[in-house]
C-alpha cells in the first residue's frame, strides 16, 4: 500500500476483516430471518456483532441499525424527520448530509478560520431557530479537523434538541468509546478496513420511526432487506482489531504527518495547510499548493505510483470544489490548487519521505513545462 495516500476515500480490507467475512460467508450464509436452526445461528451471530459494535461505540445494541453505508444512514435520518422540522447542519458536512438536508428548513452553521464549528454559534442558532436536530460531523473528511461533538451533544441535551454526528471519518482513527452520547451516529465500514456497502446508523433508544427503506421487518422494522451479515461481521472485526492500538497510532502517525508538512514547507514557501492549528485526524493533510492545478499534481503523482485526492472523492465530478476550502472563503484560484493527502495505519516515514520527494519532482517537471514522465 506504499504510495496510497487516499485513505479518507476508502481503505484496503483489513486482513482480519477478510478472514471474518470468508468465515461468515462459508458458515453463516443463511437468511437470519428464516426459521430453521442454521438461520437462527446466523441471526445469533448477527445480534452478537451488534452487541460487540455497541460496546465499541458506547451505545446499547438495540439502538444500532445496519445499513449499506454512511450515505444511506444520513439519508435515512433526514428522511425520518417530520417535514416541518428545522435542522442545523455545519457548512462542512459531507454531501450525503447536505443533500439530504436540502429543502428541510436547514440552517447552515459557519466554521471558524480553522475549519471548526464553534459551540457558541450552535447555541445561538438553537436559541434563535429552535431546530429539532443539529448535525455536525465528528471529523471532517477533507481537512481532518475534529469537531467538538462531545460538547455539542451535551449542549443539545441541555436544550432538548437531538444531536447527530456523522462519524464516518472518526471511527477506526480515534477512540469511539463515548460516541454513544450522541442521539444519532453514522458509520461506514470501508473507512476503517471493512468492506464497501456496509455501515450503520445509531438511533435514540426509543426511536423506531425509520422507514427509509421499506419492505420486510428486518432490523426491527427500521430497515428492510436481508442483513449482509458477512460484511457486518467484517466491519465489527476490523474495528475491534484497530481500536486497542489507536492511541499509539495517533502518536506515531501524527509525528510522521507533521514531519511531512515540515519537509514540504522547506520545499514550497507559500504552502497553505488547511486547519493546521486545529486538532485533526492523525492521517490527513489538506493543502493549497503554491502553484499549478491540483489535477496536474494528481495525475503526475499517480504516474509515479502515488494516490492522492483533490478534496473529497464524492465531489470528484467537480474537481477542485473542496467543500471545506469553499466554506473558508478561498478564492477560485486557490480552490483549483487544493490537494488532500490521507495516510493509513501502516504508513511509514519512508512512504511520507518518498511522497515529499515526488512532489518536488513533479514541481520541477511542471515548472519546466515538460511532458509528464
Ligand atoms: N460521510 C463522510 C464524512 C464521509 O467521509 C463519507 C465517505 N466519503 C460518507 C459520509 C459516505 O460514506 P459511504 O461511502 O459509506 O456512503
Image (spheres, rainbow, N blue to C red):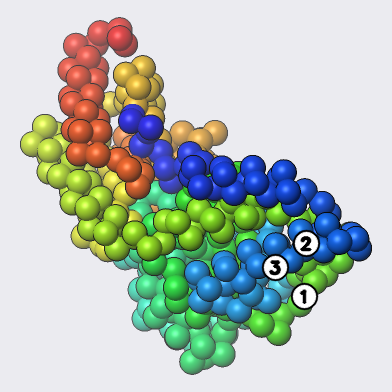
How many residues crowd around disc 2 within 10 Å: few (fewer than 14), some, or many (20 or more)? some
Tell me if mark 1 has few (under 14), some (14-19) or many (20+) residues whose alpha carbon lies within 10 angstroms of its own. Answer: few
For the residues bearing labels 2 and 3, Cβ distance under 8 angstroms: no
| Label placed on residue 41 | 2
- Depth check, front residue: 241 or 361: 241
As helix, strand or loop, the secondary structure at mark 3 comes to: helix
Question: What residue do we see at 22% from left, 14% from top?
Answer: 365
Find numbered disc 1 in the image and state the secondary structure of the residue it sits on.
loop
CA neighbours of label 3 inside 10 A, class few (<14), some (14 to 19), many (20+): some
* Residue at the (51%, 47%) spot, across then down: 16
Viewer can see residue 263:
yes
Distance of mark 3 from mark 1, alpha carbons?
20 Å
The disc at residue 282 is none
As drawn, the residue found furthest toward the right would be 35
User: In this rendering, does residue 135 appear at all?
Assistant: no
Local SS, label 2 = helix
Q: Position of residue 1 (x, y in %)?
A: 38, 32
Q: Mark 1 sits on what residue? A: 209
Q: Is residue 303 above or below residue 318?
A: above
Amino acid at each position: 500500500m506504499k504510495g496510497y495516500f487516499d485513505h479518507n476515500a476508502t481503505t484496503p480490507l483489513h486482513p482480519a476483516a477478510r478472514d471474518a467475512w470468508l468465515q461468515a460467508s462459508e458458515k453463516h450464509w443463511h437468511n437470519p430471518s428464516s426459521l430453521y436452526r442454521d438461520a437462527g445461528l446466523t441471526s445469533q451471530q448477527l445480534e452478537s456483532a451488534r452487541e460487540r459494535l455497541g460496546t465499541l461505540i458506547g451505545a446499547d445494541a438495540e439502538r444500532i441499525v445496519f445499513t449499506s453505508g454512511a450515505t444511506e444512514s444520513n439519508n435515512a435520518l433526514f428522511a425520518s424527520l417530520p417535514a416541518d422540522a428545522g435542522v442545523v447542519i455545519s457548512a462542512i458536512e459531507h454531501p450525503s448530509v447536505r443533500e439530504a438536508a436540502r429543502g428541510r428548513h436547514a440552517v447552515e452553521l459557519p466554521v471558524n478560520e480553522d475549519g471548526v464549528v464553534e459551540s457558541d454559534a450552535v447555541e445561538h442558532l438553537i436559541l434563535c431557530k429552535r431546530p429539532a436536530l443539529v448535525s455536525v460531523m465528528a471529523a471532517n473528511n477533507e481537512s481532518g479537523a475534529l469537531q467538538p461533538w462531545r460538547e455539542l451533544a451535551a449542549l443539545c441535551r441541555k436544550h432538548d434538541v437531538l444531536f447527530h454526528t456523522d462519524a464516518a471519518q472518526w471511527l477506526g482513527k480515534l477512540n469511539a468509546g463515548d460516541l454513544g452520547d450522541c442521539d444519532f451516529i453514522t458509520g461506514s465500514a470501508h473507512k476503517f478496513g471493512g468492506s464497501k456497502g456496509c455501515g450503520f446508523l445509531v438511533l435514540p433508544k426509543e426511536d423506531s420511526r425509520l422507514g427509509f427503506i421499506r419492505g420486510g421487518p428486518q432490523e426491527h422494522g427500521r430497515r428492510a432487506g436481508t442483513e449482509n451479515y458477512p460484511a457486518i461481521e467484517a466491519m465489527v472485526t476490523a474495528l475491534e482489531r484497530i481500536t486497542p492500538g489507536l492511541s499509539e497510532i495517533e502518536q506515531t502517525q501524527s509525528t510522521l504527518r507533521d514531519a511531512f508538512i515540515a519537509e514540504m514547507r522547506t520545499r514550497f514557501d507559500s504552502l497553505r495547510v488547511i486547519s493546521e492549528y486545529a486538532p485533526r485526524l492523525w492521517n490527513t493533510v489538506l493543502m493549497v499548493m503554491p502553484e499549478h492545478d491540483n489535477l496536474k499534481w494528481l495525475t503526475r503523482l499517480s504516474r509515479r505510483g502515488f494516490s492522492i485526492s483533490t478534496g473529497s472523492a464524492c465531489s470528484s465530478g467537480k474537481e477542485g470544489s473542496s467543500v471545506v476550502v469553499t466554506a473558508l472563503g478561498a478564492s477560485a484560484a486557490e480552490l483549483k490548487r487544493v490537494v488532500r493527502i490521507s495516510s493509513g495505519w501502516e504508513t511509514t516515514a519512508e512512504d511520507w519521505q518518498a511522497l515529499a520527494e515526488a512532489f518536488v519532482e513533479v514541481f520541477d517537471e511542471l515548472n519546466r513545462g515538460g511532458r509528464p514522465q
